[in-house]
Image (spheres, helix red, strand yellow):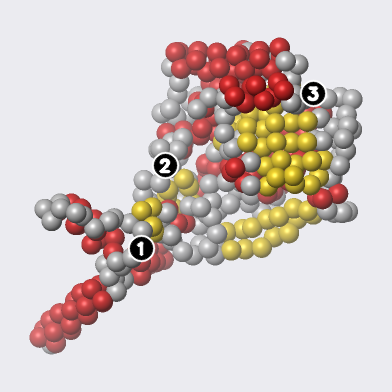
Amino acid sequence: MKKIISISFCTLIGIALVCATIFFNRQGDVFSTEKRAIASKPSNITDFKGWDAYFNDRFGGRDQLIDLANYIDRNLMDKTIKNAKAFQGKNGWFFYINTADGNNQGDFDKTNLLNEDELKQFKDEVNDITSWCNSNDIKCLFVICPNKHNVYPEYHILTRPDGKTRTEQLLEAFDQAHVKCIYPLNYLLSKKKESTYPIYYETDTHWNDLGAFYAFEKIREEISLLFPDKHFPQIEYKTKVSFSESAGDILPMLNIKNAKSTRISLSPVNGKLTDYFSYIKNEGRDGIITKGKDATLPRAIIFRDSFCTAMVQYLSTLFSEAEYDWRRITEEDKQNIIANKPDIIIFESVERNSISIVKE
């Protein structure tokens, strides 16, 4: 029996080595799932680390073995999948923790608090931009979009410690500067309790269209106060729900191909969005410009990030024209803004990057 087991084991190892050689990946440059470059062939034969990375990235059957390992960990071993960018939380929820992009984990742990000098710099930046807007008769509004772990902490693998958050520091700075900043966390939490469906994606960093709509409701309230003489449309929306097993920006980071995610879309009950606005330009990250059907409404410029993407469909109904720029405002922007003066500028940022809501 021992001899049969030994022969079988050696045969399996031999087959694995043959497959790894036959199906060796010599052509690829980028992992489509992991969204990173594949190690290239070293030019120096003594570059042992380079050769190790080269063979580890390219041996035949690599993706299939990773899929098998993830399946065993998640379904048989009940083990949390985690790396430097993301991790699997509870009940099929996934969270983003990349320290190179805002450091969500540091925010969750409350280890990213600002010192006095950093707070002063932030206040100065806010004061400078609001003073510039005021001097040019342009209204401004700041929006901080809550991190996913603040809305769904029950699915995180850790318990968040007590104490002040960095966002609370920033909100105090806005208050001291007498500048309005919308941070709709409490409103989202209340809506979450009422909602049958999640308001953030289970397998993605972002809120879904429903969460974005709830945040928009708070923005619309404030814009109505800023422009009391304007008649903004009140649109009733219907909800469509579907499900996906492969959607979301987090799954590729963990090399997971299948995990259930709720997909929600909203559309006007009576009519369609094109009844309220159309796209002059729709190039995603490179810029979006919409033109409203009501020329009496304000004109807006929105400096934003990816969290605003789901809000474009709602925000655009409030403006006669809206320009969405995926970046922070620059001196060159200021010159163009003065030449083509909008009525309002909105500065939007996800919470993890909100320290840079004015400047990178």
Residue on which the image places disc 1: 28
Q: Position of residue 82 (x, y in %)?
A: 38, 51
Q: Name the disc covering residue 85, or none.
A: none
Counting the numbered discs, the total is 3
Q: Name the disc covering residue 226, or none.
A: 3
Q: Residue 68 sits in which quadrant?
A: bottom left
Near mark 1 (Cα within 10 A), the count class, few <14, some 14-19 or many ≥20, is: few
Q: Circle 1 sits in a helix, a strand or a loop, which is it?
A: loop
Q: Could you tell me the amino acid type at mark 3?
A: Leu
Q: Are marks 3 and 1 in contact (CB under 8 Å)?
A: no
Q: Could you tell me the amino acid type at mark 2?
A: Asn
Q: Is 11 in front, or is 149?
A: 11
Near mark 2 (Cα within 10 A), the count class, few <14, some 14-19 or many ≥20, is: some
Can you say whether 229 is above or below 184 in the image?
A: above
Q: Is residue 168 visible?
A: no
- Residue 11 appears left or right of 176: left
Picture residue at 19% right of the left edge, 57% below the top: 51
Q: Name the disc covering residue 98, or none.
A: 2
Q: Position of residue 140 (x, y in %)?
A: 70, 23
Q: CA distance from mark 3 to mark 2?
A: 37 Å
Q: Circle 3 sits in a helix, a strand or a loop, which is it?
A: helix
Q: Position of residue 75 (x, y in %)?
A: 41, 66
Picture residue at 87% right of the left edge, 54% below the top: 271
Picture residue at 29% right of the left edge, 60% below the top: 57
Q: Earlier in the sequence, mark 3 or mark 1?
A: 1
Q: Is 65 in front, or is 345?
A: 345
Q: Earlier in the sequence, mark 3 or mark 2?
A: 2
Q: CA distance from mark 3 to mark 1?
A: 54 Å
Q: Could you tell me the amino acid type at mark 1?
A: Gly
Picture residue at 62% right of the left edge, 46% below the top: 284
Q: Circle 2 sits in a helix, a strand or a loop, which is it?
A: loop
Query: Of discs 1 and 2, which sits in the foreground?
Result: 1
